[in-house]
Amino acid sequence: MPIDPRPFTSTPSPRAPRDPRDAAGADGEPLGALPVWDYSGLYAEPADDAIAADIKQIEADASAFADAYQGKLASLSGAAFAEAIAKYESVNERVGRVLSYLGLRYRQKADEPARAKAYGDADAAITRGTAPMVFFLLELNRIDDARLEEMLAESAEAARYRPWLERSRAFRPHQLSDELERYLHDKSVVGSSSWVRLYDDTTAALKFDVVLDGETKTQSLEETLTLMSDAKPEKRAAGYAALTKVFQDNIQLFTLITNTLAKEKEIDDQWRKYPQPESFRHLANHVEAEVVDALRDSVVAAYPQLSHRYYRLKAKWLGVEKLEIWDRNAPLPDEDDRQIPWDEARDVVLGAYGDFAPEMADIAQQFFDKNWIDAPAGNGKAPGAFAHPTVAAAHPFVLLNYLGKTRDVFTLAHELGHGVHQVLAAGQGELLSHTPLTLAETASVFGEMLTFKRYLAAETDAKKRKAMLAGKVEDMINTVVRQIAFYSFESRVHRERREGELTAEKIGEIWMQAQKDSLGDAFNYPDSYASFWTYIPHFIHTPFYVYAYAFGDGLVNALYGVYEESVAKGEAGFQQKYFDLLRAGGTKGHKELLAPFGLDATDPTFWSKGLNLIAQMIDELEAMEG
């Protein structure tokens, strides 16, 4: 499919730029006025006429593009080749603008049929309208290497697109015939995208009846998941019970969706001759399979020294022989569990960013001043959080479900890191600003680390510092250990699906094994936990996305170590190199980007350095026990 708008990284009428009501946090305490999206950077609302005009223009441009270039690419001069790529890029930008706008509105209120219909209709119309352009990447990939080099040598503007061309041509061995690629393009709207939409519509509409003190309160998925981080055990257990009931009630639908998508991927992989289920993701991420394997193997080998050891400590701190599975994210007894107002969260994150580099805080400030953030939690809203870059000519949009927990502050720091990265990379243009997933997590995890260090430096109470350190260890375990466990689960599901359809019980069995391996013997594992794979959207939206989190965390641990060394030595220049890394977007691979910092992810010892940092933090926590 030639048009590839960027994926989401996850009210009946348009809402005002700021909600005048004080939003309530997880415990009902006011959080202050939370921002909601202002869409004017994409379209002036109402945007119906403008969107219809843009879809019509996309269709006209795609047809004209095919008339001008189909069958002629290899014979173009360098200047004409550059012009062709620029026109292709322009169509991509218009497509991205339409689908970003409608996709964001849909995810803001996914249970509103009109928004879902508008998004689905536009996606279908654009898929149909861009069909004439299917030839472009196929024909591009058939150009002889020597001829391509001649064209690039003739035009500096064409040569600027070399990184994008190399990424596109990396898929040459997996390209099908023009006719079959056109068929798959036309069919895509009723293929995997429809199953993904069914999943999104279903999860957004789920309601969870939480029973506490004899009273029942109906909540959204995000609000119910948040209960699993509550200081009160009874609330954690009630949240778990509500989640379990709804997940199990819908288990057959989620099983069907998972089986269908995994089978469709298997068929696609076979036709395209991808050797493993993960191969496409590695190629799209511009990372060698050996590097990902080394990461996975290093983390799995470190399970006993990381998660197993930490959760035994946590059981001791909570005064139990074994943790219940709903205690995994329970706050420690001395953890700050107050509700953090929105303005305080903003000031903490901007302060941490500003301490590192004023330019970083200035970019992040725009997200607050211009309502590029949608923060309130609510029924129908997509769960979790994401930063969507939309198009290079506009700006990113950040979605949160802010409930005032400390983890929500770190989520804000994480997504703003993505946002800053996307703003800086946008200067590369629509095709060159796309960052591989493995590198896309760099700025987000780095932003979290900056915010954590600021929190830690300001805390003088020894017990609270211990709780903060433990919280950071948990976040790193969730980012590294948990995501690699997800990756192991996904890999096994896709492999076993090739042997036949998987029952809900079989998928649950694979899930339970991955969780027991990664979390260790500090937990009780009730049979009902076997349904918890159902709410992880990455398995549905972007297969094998999850290892990018572990990749990013390990990379940032190493990168932050270089930063701290430079500060200790009084050396300048780290910030400039860091901003150069972010501005590069998709123009460089991980090896080239890390070289200025003296780092190399292909080094077999690279991942152990980041894992050792987590182990050292757990060592410090154990020492506090003495």
Image: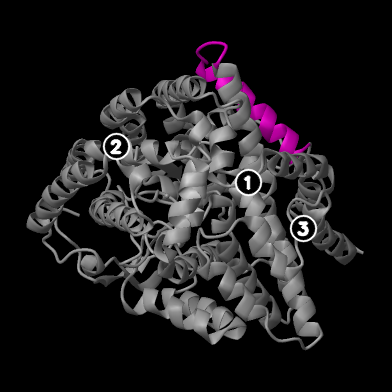
Q: Position of residue 119 (x, y in %)?
A: 22, 44
Outermost residue on the right side: it is 626
Rendered-image quadrant of the N terminus:
top left
Q: What range is drawn magenta here?
A: 498-520
Label 3 is placed on what type of residue? Gly
Q: Is residue 419 visible?
A: yes
Q: Which residue is mark 2?
A: 71
Outermost residue on the left side: it is 49
Dot 2: element: loop
Label 1 is placed on what type of residue? Val
Placement of 427 over or under 361, stated as above or below? above
**Can residue 400 be found in the magenta stretch?**
no
Left or right: where 435 falls relative to 594: left
Outermost residue on the top side: it is 500
Q: How many marks?
A: 3
Placement of 311 over or under 531, stated as above or below? below
Q: Which residue is mark 3?
A: 610
Q: Which mark is residue 287?
A: 1
Question: Of label 1 and label 3, which has the lower sequence position?
Answer: 1
